[in-house]
Image: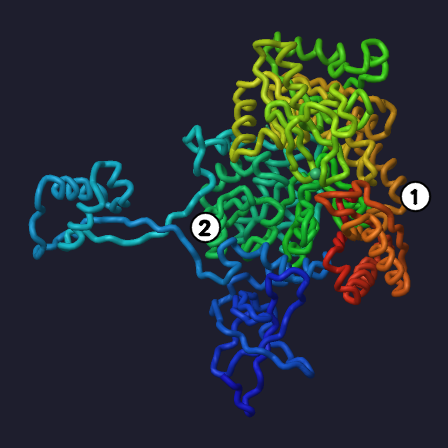
Amino acid sequence: VPSSPNSPEQVILVAVPVPGLGVLSYRVPAGVARPPKGARVMVPLGGRTVAGCVVDPHAAPPANAELRDILEVVDADPFLPPVVVDLALWVGEYYASGPGDALAIAMPPSARGGQRTAFRTVTRADLVTGAPEAPPPRGLKQREALTILGEAPGGLTLPDLARRGVGAATVRSLAAVGRVRLREEIVERDPFTAGDADGAGGHWSIAQASTPGRALTDEQTDALARLSAEAARAQFRTVLLHGVTGSGKTELYLRLADAVTAAGRRVLVLVPEIALTPALAGLFRTRFGARVAIQHSGLSTGERHDQWHRIRRGDVDIVVGTRSAVFAPLERIGLIVVDEEHESSYKQEEAPRYHGRDVAVVRGRMEQALVVLGSATPSLESAANVRAGRYEGVYLTRRIFDRPLATVRVVDMRQEFAARGPEVRFSEVLTTALADRLAKGEQSLVLLNRRGFASVVFCRQCGGTIECPRCSVSLTYHRAARRLRCHYCDHAAAVPKRCAACQGEYLEQSGFGTERLEADLAARFPGARIARVDRDTVRRRGAVTRVLADVARGRIDILVGTQMIAKGHDFPAVTLVGVVSADVGLGLADFRAAERTFQLLTQVVGRAGRGQIPGEAIVQTIYPDHYSIRAAAAQDYAQFLAREMEFRTTLHYPPAVALVNVIVKGRTLEAALTGAQDLVTRVREIGLAGRVLGPAPAAIARIKEEYRAQFFIKSPTTRRNAARAAIERALAERPDLKRRTIVDVDPVSVM
Ligand code: ADP
Ligand code: ZN
């Protein structure tokens, strides 16, 4: 439809889910109502038609461009709440990813192509009473059906009727003669009750009983008073709730959510990984019932779709979810909780590379909400924000009932190796302690943050190791699968009989992971009930939660696992935690190595002694004097923070500076390095009040057949936008490089 020359042109800005594209201008044909912000529209893009989202319904026509018309308005009302559109735009800009990717995350799965909603429906039948015209029932089946329906005032669904022996054909024949009315209704696919092998509400029921009546401790009372006062002001504020492990942070989240929902506002709760924290989701569900929705990537597409629409319709007051839930279409938010705010899983390691915690704070600002970041081991970023006065600090320094933190014993494995050889995996101290707990019927956790059976397979003749053909890392041996596997690209191969390089026949294994520990423990303690949790054992949906539920019910004696077992679990019968190699992460070329080690150790040690019996932790290490291990053993956050902050400041790492990590990929290392060098040169020319370091080959120089060169841009925290602008400009001039470059703003992992 050509727009008439007299009517002013209606121009709108549209974001399309195409990586790297900015917002685009389109014309709304005359006679078509201007779609509101957040509505979906079908637009032409090149030769294709794509679904986009209106981000600005009143844009100025660009100066000298031919505008194309939108093809269709999908939604007359905003499909996404306007705040969520703004949030996606902010993410697209801050993380240099463009708005399309962020908007795609905000959309429910089925809506991205512009489809109208796809609900699952079921047919419900009920009796038509007082239908004198209708013929009497014919035959036994019809009479039976009428009797059953007569006793069900709300009617019954066809599947319900089928279970009682009434077939769909019978119901339909009764409907045809007017004795029965049929209607379609939407079935909510509810992940709280869905598909569990053990049925009956499944793993969500492991949450402890809701106890709204119990008295808070003095510390909890003070903290709640401060937090509630902040929430009542209905203004943006961020509070870091720093509470030692077992200090009762969860109870505070629940009470705060109570106060906020009672005041008519809604609550968003972010958790690092739902599968590992089903108890928290379960507690909210127990306390608040059906007005809680959960959102995470482990749900089926149908479940995610239904949860999204429940939230969007306003049927939900509380959303519990993983990082992408920060884009939940919840309106009138008064409180956002980010539990375990230090967790690296809040950072998305693909575009848009956003940090769920930081986006939560931005959303809190847009919503005029209180944001509570909870942790026993706050990130350096959040600690720095408290220091700078941007966040308020609220502290819980003691455990519930003043239960002591676990006592920690550090075992120097160098002495152990000297005495008993390099193959020792369990020290005498740890072995004895495990035997003692088994004898007493108490539970133990054994942590090793490395999965698999053997980390390396090497040839005794030439010394060569078996590497991934696609990545520059060794393959790990997985015994149960009888395969070698790459932990970066998942490449799998059979174990060869001979060395590929020298045909040597003696291939040996070295290094060990959780699978090996599990086997060791089974051999050492026959009869003990041992389970393992790591990425290999959790491939099946619901598998982790089932193991965790077994631990909670006392059906497991020793739980072996990677960092997955260190999360916020509350297992009161665990009295011993053993850390097999505390230093696994310390050797990595990553400025966060010490922070991660400290957090992991403190968190896992915090799993012990949460019940009546005091806990003990045994930490095996070859670096007993490293400050992250010492501070974790002392469970002294302040001591760690002081040392680490000094390191970050002196060596110019976040949070002392703003960091952008740029990775350029190439078919050869040289191509990658040359490309990176071109960008470095250009960024330096543009100038940005910062420093550029590199390029150099990345710590893992090759992943999935691509070589990787890396450089950093470090800038004062007040100039972070300038640094990003410089790299974006350099890339805009080089589309050839842009396609193979990753820009990671505020990186969490720099490997
Ligand atoms: P955190 O998240 O701080 O590690 P939790 O919230 O898991 O700690 O609380 C630790 C344990 O203390 C849980 O079993 C919880 O149910 C219990 N708890 C919390 N607050 C109270 C209270 N006021 N009285 C009694 N038990 C409490
Ligand atoms: Zn690989």
Decide which of tag 2 and tag 1 comes sooner along the chain. 2
User: Residue 5's spot in the image, x, y percent?
Assistant: 56, 91
Asked if the residue at tag 1 contacts the one at tag 2, i.e. Cβ–Cβ closer than 8 Å, the answer is no
**Closest to the observer: 184 or 168?**
168
Question: Can I make out residue 347 in this image?
Answer: yes
Q: Mark 2 to mark 1: distance in Å? A: 50 Å
Does the Cβ of the disc 2 residue fall within 8 Å of ligand 1? no
Q: The C terminus is located in which quarter?
A: top right
- Which residue type carries mark 2? Asp
Q: Nearer the viewer, residue 325 or 479?
A: 479
Q: Is residue 279 above or below residue 48?
A: above
Q: Residue 133 at x, y = what percent?
A: 8, 57
Residue lying at 46% horizontally and 56% vertically, measured from the top left:
313
Circle 2 Cα neighbour tier, 10 Å, few/some/many (<14 / 14–19 / ≥20)? many
Q: Amino acid at mark 1?
A: Thr
Q: Which residue is mark 2?
A: 306
Q: Quadrant of residue 215?
A: top right
Residue, x 80% and y 29% (percent of image)? 636
Element type where label 1 sits in the image = helix
Q: How far from the left and from the top, in percent, is residue 70?
A: 53, 74
Secondary structure, mark 2, is: helix
- State the colouring used for the structure image: rainbow
Residue pushed farthest right?
650
Q: Is residue 484 left or right of residue 161?
A: right
The residue to which callout 1 is attached is: 650
Displayed quadrant of residue 338: top right
- Ligand 1, image quadrant it occupies: top right
Pointer 1 local density, CA inside 10 Å: few below 14, some 14–19, many at least 20: few
Q: Is residue 399 visible?
A: no
